[in-house]
Image (spheres, rainbow, N blue to C red):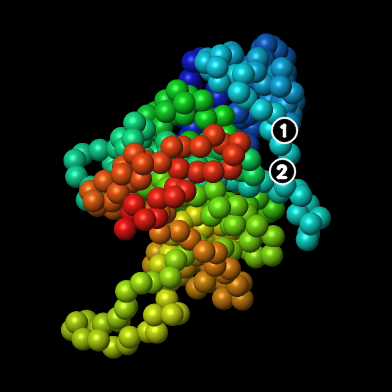
Amino acid sequence: MNEHIIGEKRDMTVSRPESSGNGSANRMQSQACLSYAEVPPAFDKVNGSANRMQSQACLSYAEPMEQRVESQARLGYPESRQRKTKVKVPPAFDKVNGVCRRHIAVILAGGSGRRVGGDCPKQFLQVGGKTVLELSIEAFHRNSRIDEIAIVTRADFIGHVSDIVRRQGYEKVRHVVAGGSERHFSTLAALELYGGAEDCLLIHDAVRPLVSQRIINDCIDALDTADAVDVAVAATDTIIAVDDEGRITDIPPRKTLRNVQTPQAFRAATLREAFRLALADSRFVPTDDCSVVFRYLPQCPIKVVEGDTANIKITYKEDLEKVEAALRHTTEADATTGKDIAQGTKQRLK
């Protein structure tokens, strides 16, 4: 596994696809061993490897404030960010199944985004003084119920994303990994990172930077009773179905139709099983992650939570302008208030 070293200390796991052999297994093992705030231990000539893994395991989940600040100082975090750091809250307790589970945001930032214009992928374009990716990261980073974040990006942008994470002090970001040529490969890369059956994944497109705290919280709440959750808004236009000749074959009732957004949320075990079945099907044509569960696990209900018209996806240049206008007219609230940058922008985006 290739690791990206930041400031001569490892502060996150960064990996690229393995080429042969037992790469996948080794990748998962090594990623599981690397701790976010790892400080390399003194080398033990006899049991160096074992001691290294043991010392990483000793960094507890709810690390005391003093240790956490000290670790961040070694990693080069600005002093102002160290003072603002809070002790990590233990994972949520699942009242239904009686287990603790982590809520993990997976941000997919692997697209090329050429339709916006220029050579820079749209997730790295500047809007309102920050990149689109940074805005998406911050939406999940300031949510107290999100335990950690993984970013899946293009292999040639791993270093760039790692620099952004370090510079901005996104302490919840634990992994930056390479995805693939298609969206579902990026999801599979995230599934390799998280083997815990009770982990809950919120998979989000990086180019939806105005996702609200209400949507994130509704997805987490829905996972109390569902294994898969989609976010959608009511369709406002009439939708038609056509054949290969361009003739209308159906006009579904608009009241039954929804436009899908992200994040889409899953129990990790459910999504992993759906992809296992999908990859064994030679006719597998993925669109989004909920479609994989819908097709290959038909017995699994998918709960739908209400989206937001402000939660737009940046696809064209005009979308970027809408986001910029929303940011220009909205003051980002402090994370402790529970507000978000999308609040109050619906009318401005119309």
Determine whether the residue tagged by mark 2 lies in a helix, strand or loop: loop
**CA gap, disc 2 and disc 1:** 9 Å
How far from the left and from the top, in percent, is residue 255? Answer: 43, 80
Three-letter residue code for mark 2: Pro
Three-letter residue code for mark 1: Tyr
Q: Judge from the rendering whether residue 255 lies leftward or rightward of residue 324; answer left or right.
A: right
Is there any visible trace of residue 29 in the rendered image? no
How far from the left and from the top, in percent, is residue 175? Answer: 53, 36
Q: What residue is shown with label 2?
A: 91
Q: Residue furthest bottom?
A: 249
If the image is split into quadrants, where does the C terminus sit? Answer: bottom left
- Quadrant in which residue 132 is drawn: top left
x 73%, y 39%: residue? 90
**In the displayed structure, would residue 233 be above or below residue 196?**
below
Q: Which mark, by number, is residue 169?
A: none
x 69%, y 65%: residue? 225
Q: What residue is shown with label 1?
A: 61
x 32%, y 78%: residue? 239
Determine whether the residue tagged by mark 1 lies in a helix, strand or loop: loop
Is there any visible trace of residue 225 in the rendered image? yes
Are dots 2 and 1 in contact, CB under 8 Å? yes
Identify which residue, 298 or 143, lies in the foreground.
143
